[in-house]
Image: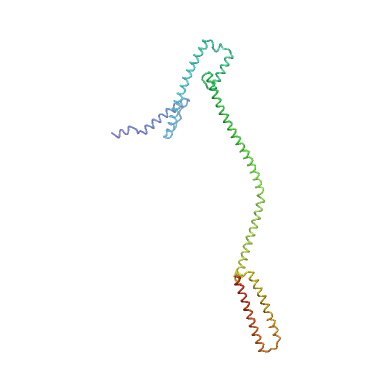
Amino acid sequence: MSDSVSLIDPPPTESRDAARIADVKAWLASQFEASAKEVPAFEYTSRSVAHLYNLATLSQAKTKAANIVAADFRQKAAEYRSQAARIREILENVGLAQESLPSNVVSSAQVLANVANLLNIRDTELSSFLVAMGDISLRKTAVEEKRAKVQKESKILLDYTRKAIARLTYLKRTLGQLEDDVAPCEAQMENWKTNLAVMASKERQYLQQYNNYKALLNRVGYTPEISHGVLVEMAEHRKELEKKTKPILDTLRSYQDLPPDKALAALAIEDKKRQYAAAEKYLEDVLHSALATND
């Protein structure tokens, strides 16, 4: 029994979709019928039905609202026509029908009606005109204030534009100068690159020479303590020692002319050796003392 019921009664979702499809078909038929056309054939998918159903709902709501507004306008128009007929009847009874009035009065009344329509007032009372004129004056003042503000802003923008144009002109002129200076600068840069390469080569050469000289000084026993002043002082001591040893050397040379007496010659040689050893010892002591003083 439950199976037969489930086969007969469709699910709620399918029932709702079928109702929506029916509403959509009815709305499409009414819309195309108004324009004397047939509804085109298309596939009713869930997406298209949902979209068309939303359009139909929105269209029906707006149509209903438009019908309400139109009915209100028709009612107001009927009221205005009845009021106009009543006023025309009153005017005709007092002899102020439009046909009996002079043309200038009709023209003035028409101008007055046009002004009332322009001012959006419903009567021709003086107070209504004054209120409308006051409202127009206020709106005019607001427009003038806004116009003054816009003119001020326009003036500021114009000033900014002039400054921007001047700055653009200056930048263009500067760009032109820079473009003119590109070629000389590139040539100068190439010259600098060449000179830099030469200087780098010279630097490597000088470093190699420095290392060679340093190795040479290390081989000959040079130390930082041996300075120019020490060498000068040692040279002066050497000169003094040469002055002191010169008489001895002269004496030794004079001994070469003596007769070849072996015993005397041996004694003289021993004496000169002692004197020479004493001179060398004195020279060493002087050198050591000079080095110690420099330290």
Q: Name the one closer to the observer, 24 or 83.
A: 83
Q: Quadrant of the N terminus?
A: top left
Q: Name the one closer to the observer, 263 or 205.
A: 263
Q: How is the image coloured?
A: rainbow
Residue 139 is left or right of residue 241, and the answer is left
Compared with residue 172, is residue 62 higher up or lower down, i.e. above or below? Answer: above
Where residue 233 sits: x, y (%)?
65, 72
Q: Name the one closer to the observer, 203 or 4.
A: 203
Residue 89 is left or right of residue 178, and the answer is left
Where residue 80 sits: x, y (%)?
49, 17
Compared with residue 241, is residue 101 higher up or lower down, i.e. above or below? Answer: above
Where residue 110 sits: x, y (%)?
56, 17
Compared with residue 192, is residue 260 higher up or lower down, i.e. above or below? Answer: below
Q: Name the one closer to the observer, 153 or 181.
A: 153
Instruction: Tell which residue pokes out farthest to the left in this image.
Output: 1
Q: Quadrant of the C terminus?
A: bottom right
